[in-house]
Amino acid sequence: MILSGKAAIWKDYQKEIADDRYFYVRSCVRQNFFPGAETTFLRIMREELGKDVYEHPCHTTCTGIGYHSDVVPIDTMMTVVARQFALMTESGYENLVPSCITSFGIYTEVLDTWKHFPEVEEKVRNYLRKATGREFQIPKNLAHASDIIYKFRSEIAAKAKYKLVNQITGEPLKVVEHIGCHYSKMFPSKGVGGAEYPYVLVGMIEEWGGELVDYPERRHCCGFGFRQYLVQANRGYSMSCSHKKFESMEPYKPDMIITNCPGCPMFLDRWQYAIAEMEGKTYGENGMGIPVFTFEEVAGLVMGYNPWDLGLQAHQVSCEPILDKIGIPYKKEEKYNGIKGKKLGKPEMPVKLKCC
Amino acid sequence: METATYLASLGFKTTLIEKSGQLGGKIRNWYKLFPNFSHSIEVFNHLQRGIDLSDVVVKLNTEVVAVEKMNPGFVLQLNNSEKLNADSIVICTGYDLFDARLKEEYGYGIYDNVITSAELEKMFASDKGIITKSGQPPKKIGFVHCVGSRDEKVGNTYCSKVCCVTGVKQAIEVKEMIPGCEVFNFYMDLRMFGMHFEAMYKKAQEEHGVNFVRGRLSECAETIDGAINLKVEDTLLGRPMKLSVDMLVLMVGMVPSEGTKKIGSLLGLEFGKNGFFKSRDQHSMANISNIPGVFMAGACINPITISHVFGHAHSAALMVASYLNNLPIENRVTEVV
């Protein structure tokens, strides 16, 4: 591997990322999948970096899942997106930051469509006007939440309590990065690092002390292609995508996986349980799985946040071994406590995938 | 070189301006030529012998930095502060190889064992022979045709003409140097247009067992042991296939050279839509530019084989001779039907 070759491509694919005053739009599904990720983003942005991040209570889905699943027509999708822009405009913000990769892809696609077909934008403006009476400005800057953390990765590193380093061996942790398909595969120039060798997560890994694992199926989908999963008959295909990736990364013995999409950590995490049950195969050390994290969770870990505040107990693959490797303290007895300390009960343990 | 040789032989005072430190251009980098596998150095020696036998003034490490149009003729300002008066100019700025890094999905410049067809030629000529990054002869090699040619994604919609047959030639050379090596050529279609090309293609399959797979690669990835995993569709079978090779060779096409762009801008020459020089007429006046007294030859006009370059070179010499002898042949005007 010639790293200078990658660096040259990374240099070609940089994008403008706003410095402050963000209009943050949450994901439909992330709060259920990994409940601490978005709150960790807001905590880092507001409390650690002192940035102005605004959320609007009337924000809705972007309809991306429905659009990509062929149940929401494009005009409807664009009108809903126009309404999000109107909320941003009414709130006095210009920099849109979606939490969801598919939303980022949807917003990017809509803006690109309107750029090339202004008459479509005018049509959608009329739809929104008739339906809601609202007007909107085009966002001055559109960046995914992972772009924002990428932008401030050095500031986070400067405040970090921990590094992505094995405290026993002193070696950098071997980290697999996986971007959501809708981050840059549709519009390579809109993603940091482009589509073939994306850098947005690599930049975080490098800055926080880890070492990138590049494996043959790095580009492959995690298995959360919407129709692969939403159509029940296709779910075997979904799992085969994840399986293919795990088989490909296995020889590199990765310590962890970092992602920036709602679906990728969900599927790469949960399917490890399913594959273990079906095939008896596990991919981590000692019969355990490879921990899969969102970029916010990893940022929170290096910042020294309590792993249970980050929501890591909601992961299928146990995080304790990687916490031990990094040297992050945690209280086992508090893993399944609620916010106010109420015991929520320990979930049933899988048979084949070892968990803590 | 060939145009200069003929012009000097015809009695014209001829100066050859070469920006590098030696004559010959890219032919010095090739090992053997299709379709007869003659050594390319033979062609270079032939060209050099012509220069030696004639009174051509050769200026190496020299570039034209400015051009002043006189009436008639030109004054060329050279990078060594010298000025050169010329009644006529022949542009022979050749081509550049397509930068394979632009096809990011193939991993050139990133994966150790992804190389270009030009780099393979150097391996053929090297004492070490064909070896992977780890120093071992490959057991499997893949050739990807049309890299940077006939590809709207990179903005080159034209055919580079020589890559198909070069891919066949190089596949045979690999089989001759490493008989046990499995060779796969991935192509869109094979344009064996020249005399003996088709026979060479047939020979590659029948005598050397080269595998020709119709389909373009979607992506390459490096494995932990440095091999290259390929994903490609076999369009004859209508099925996707995946295989691993020890070395991947990208058949890079021709693009307009930096020298072509530079001298074209200095002189005000017209460029065609593909960025090469535009001929007055593609059929009958290929060597004639839009500026009286300025002629062109070779791959600065379009992708071309070495065989055809000689025809261009001789033709350009005749055009210049005609022009300098005040024969108005190039100004023939015919009615466009």
Image (tube, coloured by chain):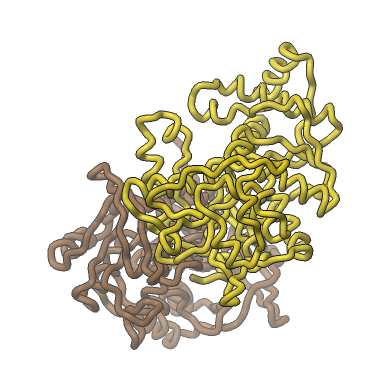
The foreground one among A338 and B273 is A338
The foreground one among A219 and B150 is A219
Horizontal arrangement in the rendering, residue B208 relative to residue A54 (left or right)? left
Q: Residue A181 in the image: x percent, y percent? A: 53, 44
For the point 32% across and 59% down, the residue is B164
The foreground one among A246 and B111 is A246
Horizontal arrangement in the rendering, residue B3 relative to residue A329 (left or right)? left
- Shade representing chain B: brown
Is residue B311 in view? no
Q: Residue A192 in the image: x percent, y percent? A: 64, 53
Q: Residue B232 in the image: x percent, y percent? A: 34, 51
- Determine whether A136 is above or below A169 in the image: above
The quadrant where residue A122 appears: top right
- Determine whether B75 is above or below B331 in the image: below
Q: Residue A256 in the image: x percent, y percent? A: 53, 59
Letter of the chain in yellow? A
For the point 49% across and 24% down, the residue is A70
Outermost residue on the top side: it is A130
Outermost residue on the left side: it is B206
Horizontal arrangement in the rendering, residue B218 relative to residue A185 (left or right)? left
- Determine whether A196 is above or below B135 in the image: above
For the point 72% across and 16% down, the residue is A126
Is residue A74 in view? yes
